[in-house]
Image (tube, rainbow, N blue to C red):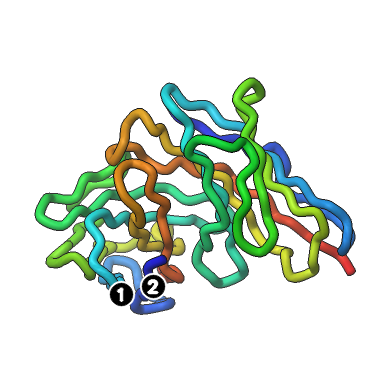
């Protein structure tokens, strides 16, 4: 069975500092990994995905994520946080071995608070 | 990425009634999904709705409670039937974008439902 864990309910960082939002996963086959962001009263916005290839994936708004197979992790990072990055972040995984029939499974979400 | 709209954006309904949520996409897509996001919770997949076939429901969700229509490649509806306060949630439509099994999913803005 697939699962995603986001161990931190909330992450607090000061503006201009680097940020990391943690995610670990469990999947039987190949992990297809995704990050989404949800602003208040808005739907989810796609940030980035890892399918294969380079372990460091770059996405929207300056975010990047690093795939670590040995640690089964896919942490979201940004070198310099902005107050406008404050939002709810979701990590998600799909089993690539299941191709089109695989379901996207979401973590519980991490609230990022960036303070000026 | 696909542009997805949902109607209504929010509604307050009385218990025992039904609400139909519409999802419109600006391009033709094969795979569409309906999710529920209960207050303060993560996303849970209700069903997958592919054009030309019956919707596939996840464990805990049944067609009598959440009937889905998928009349063409740009439109779908989800009905929440015989509502109770426990159905108060955000309901999100999602579409798959990309080829093969490496697609990412995009989400509509959601429908915020409150049942009194």
State which quadrant residue B58 falls in: top left
Is residue A85 depicted above or below A111 in this figure?
A: below
Quarter of the figure with the C terminus of chain A: bottom right
State which quadrant residue B22 falls in: bottom left
Is there one chain holding both mark 1 and mark 2? yes
The percent coordinates of residue A15 (x first, y second) are 87, 64
Q: Nearer the viewer, residue B62 or A51?
A: A51
Residue sitting farthest toward the left:
B52
Residue at point 43%, 22% (across, down): A28
User: Which subunit holds the residue at mark 1?
Assistant: B
Is residue B22 depicted above or below B45 in this figure?
A: below
* Disc sitting over residue A11 in the figure: none
User: Which subunit holds the residue at mark 2?
Assistant: B
Q: Is residue B114 visible?
A: no
* Disc sitting over residue B26 in the figure: 1
Residue B71 as seen in the image, left or right of residue A107: left
Quarter of the figure with the N terminus of chain A: top left
Q: Nearer the viewer, residue A47 or A53?
A: A53
The percent coordinates of residue B98 (x first, y second) are 35, 53
Q: Is residue B3 visible?
A: yes
Q: Nearer the viewer, residue B80 or A87?
A: A87
The percent coordinates of residue A17 (x first, y second) are 88, 56
Residue at point 30%, 71% (across, down): B25
Residue at point 40%, 62% (across, down): B92
Residue at point 56%, 31% (across, down): A25
Whether pointer 1 and pointer 2 mark residues with C-beta atoms closer than 8 Å, the reply is: yes
* Disc sitting over residue B3 in the figure: 2
């Amino acid at each position: 069975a697939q699962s995603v864990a986001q161990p931190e309910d909330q992450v607090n960082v000061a503006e201009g500092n680097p940020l990391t939002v943690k995610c670990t996963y469990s999947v039987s086959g190949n992990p297809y990994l995704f990050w989404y962001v949800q602003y208040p009263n808005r739907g989810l916005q796609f940030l980035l995905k890892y399918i294969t290839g380079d372990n460091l994936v770059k996405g929207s708004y300056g975010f990047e994520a690093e795939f670590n197979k040995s640690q089964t992790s896919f942490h979201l990072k940004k070198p310099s946080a902005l107050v406008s990055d404050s939002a709810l972040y979701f990590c998600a995984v799909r089993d690539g071995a299941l191709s089109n029939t695989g379901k996207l499974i979401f973590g519980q979400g991490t609230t990022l608070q960036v303070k000026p | 990425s696909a542009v997805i709209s949902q109607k209504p954006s929010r509604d307050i309904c009385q218990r025992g009634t039904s609400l139909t949520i519409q999802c419109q996409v600006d391009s033709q897509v094969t795979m569409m999904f309906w999710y529920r996001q209960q207050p303060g919770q993560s996303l849970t997949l209700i069903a997958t709705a592919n054009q030309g076939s019956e919707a596939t429901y996840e464990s805990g969700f049944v067609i009598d409670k959440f009937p889905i229509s998928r009349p063409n490649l740009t439109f779908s509806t989800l009905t929440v039937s015989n509502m109770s306060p426990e159905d108060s949630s955000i309901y999100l439509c999602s579409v798959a974008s990309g080829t093969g099994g490496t697609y990412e999913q995009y989400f509509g803005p959601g429908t915020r439902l409150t049942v009194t």
